[in-house]
Amino acid sequence: MLHFCGQDKALIDSNGRIKLSPRVLNDFENNGGFEVVLHCLPEGAIGVYPEAVYLKMREGELNPTEKAASSIVYRRNLRRFGSFSQTERISAQGRVTIPQGYRDFSGIKPGAEVMIVGCEIGVEIWRLDRWTEELTKINEHMNEKANREMAKDLLLEK
């Protein structure tokens, strides 16, 4: 069965909460439960990941302490992840609270309609206009890639 796929519209309530669809709630339940990590993405969206998935995203660096001691770029990356990540719990009503700073970062206002987008390892919360822009970028990139691939094939045929 596919997990964390599809798109759903949702409203941000006056307390900064989003009600997740039953499908998304089921995906979280089947992938570690209702402890999640919120992470502000550079694209302007908010990622919502099962805690275990987030921890896997962050592992894999050999000698992180040594690297932090010697690399300003690495320390900045640690700061970005540390300051823009926070654990939350999905409520019994299926809602997750988006902290004020995260709403400010993403430009999401109370009462606004947002798009909850599956990204296979969790979901992302997008302001509708930013999601439309992101889809345009994705499609443009895929078309450019397809054109390069086709041009390469034509060169190989000669």
Image: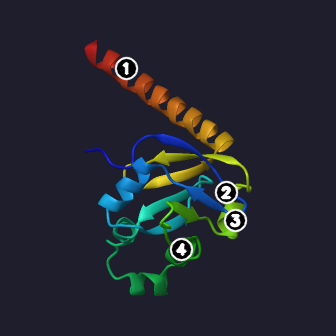
Residue indicated by mark 3: 15
Secondary element at tag 1: helix
How far is the residue under mark 2 from the one under mark 1?
37 Å
Question: In the rendered structure, are the residues bearing label 4 and label 1 in contact, judged by CB atoms less than 8 Å apart?
Answer: no
How far is the residue under mark 4 from the one under mark 3?
17 Å
Residue 121 visible in the snapshot: no
Residue indicated by mark 4: 86
Q: Is residue 100 left or right of residue 40?
A: right
What type is the residue that disc 2 sits on? Ser
User: In front: 106, or 18?
Assistant: 18
Secondary element at tag 4: strand
Residue 46, percent across and down?
57, 58
Secondary element at tag 3: loop
Question: In the rendered structure, are the residues bearing label 2 and label 3 in contact, judged by CB atoms less than 8 Å apart?
Answer: no
Q: Residue at x 67, y 57 (%)?
A: 106
Closer to the chain start, of discs 4 and 3, is 3
User: Which residue sits furthest front?
Assistant: 93
Residue indicated by mark 1: 150
Question: In the rendered structure, are the residues bearing label 2 and label 4 in contact, judged by CB atoms less than 8 Å apart?
Answer: no
What type is the residue that disc 1 sits on? Met
Residue 49, percent across and down?
43, 62
Residue indicated by mark 2: 106
Question: In the rendered structure, are the residues bearing label 1 and label 3 in contact, judged by CB atoms less than 8 Å apart?
Answer: no
